[in-house]
Image (cartoon, grey):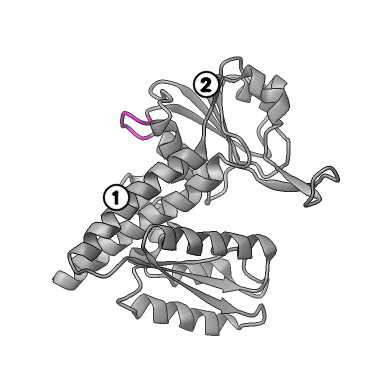
Amino acid sequence: MQIIDGKTISAEIKKEIAAEVAGLIDKGQRAPHMAAILVGHDGASETYVASKEKNCHSVGMTSSVYRYEENISEQALLEVISFLNGDPEVDGFIVQLPLPKHMNVDRIIAAIDPDKDIDGFHPMNMGRLVLGEDTFIPATPYGIMELLKRSGIETVGKECVVLGRSNIVGTPMALLMSRNNEHANATVTLCHSKTRNLAEVTRRADILVAAIGKPGFVKADMVKEGAVVVDVGIHRIEDTSKQSGFRLIGDVDYEEVAPKCSAITPVPGGVGPMTIAALLVNTMKAYRKNIAKEKR
């Protein structure tokens, strides 16, 4: 069984990006600049944004975080987005989700300049993804595609089942796996809460992507012998044997499922590091777009 090591592969990607950034700076150009907007004090969001900031600095990029209290008005947040849209020094930015309940998330995302939307959530970028056009790919699905490619996992002609239909992971994942290229060309089934006989469907999968948001949901009887399993979930569960008092698990019951797999991603250390790496890749893409605009 192969454990697909997201830490090692993300380190490779970051090394490539760091070399490119160093080359830009050697030529007298400015470093790419990623910004993040963080509203409130959600623990997971704080951790994620801090990780983005740390990883930006590790590859030589500039990073800015705009922090606001949970009671900021939607209009005030839209004004911050407008400011970042117009700032030529900011190449790309994200609005960290979830947002407070008084915010219209769709309106907030739609306000982001599509050319700075490094999360790939803007309706225009999602539409380009559906059409197979060049665009910002949402970071987690992009990271998974890189994991499969760089781990030598064959996808062409394989049956892929995606558990979960969110716009952040499941739906773009299904689109990417069905694309006509040498690192995709799978036959894809997208499952969700209304899928009948779910275990029968998942047992057909040569490649199973679990992004259903339920800890330990995927059991051994849902997985075909020799399948490749990608676990997108990450959940804190109480564990008094740990100094922290908790441990992290995914959407897959790893101990049960791993022995049946030809390859599997661990939690932590699988998909998570790749999401950050993919965001850095998207920032480089946004930087190139921005520089091309400046030259016109």
Q: Dot 1 surroundings within 10 Å: few (below 14), some, or many (20 or more)?
A: few
Say whether residue 268 is magenta: no
Task: Report the residue marked by disc 1.
Answer: 134
Residue 153: x percent and y percent? Answer: 43, 25
What residue range appears in magenta? 179-184
Q: What secondary structure predominates along the stretch shown in magenta?
A: loop
Per the image, label 2 sits on a secondary structure element best described as loop
Using the rendered image of the protein, determine whether residue 273 is visible from the camera's viewpoint.
yes
Report the residue at 57% width, 71% height from top: 38
- Residue sticking out furthest to the right: 240
**Quadrant, the C terminus:** bottom left
Residue 27: x percent and y percent? Answer: 17, 64
Residue 206 is marked as 2
Q: Is residue 139 left or right of residue 134?
A: right
Q: Amino acid at mark 1?
A: Asp
Earlier residue among tags 2 and 1: 1
Q: Quadrant of residue 295?
A: bottom left
Q: Dot 2 surroundings within 10 Å: few (below 14), some, or many (20 or more)?
A: many
Q: Quadrant of residue 288?
A: bottom left
Report the residue at 39% width, 32% height from top: 149
- Residue sticking out furthest to the left: 296
Per the image, label 1 sits on a secondary structure element best described as loop
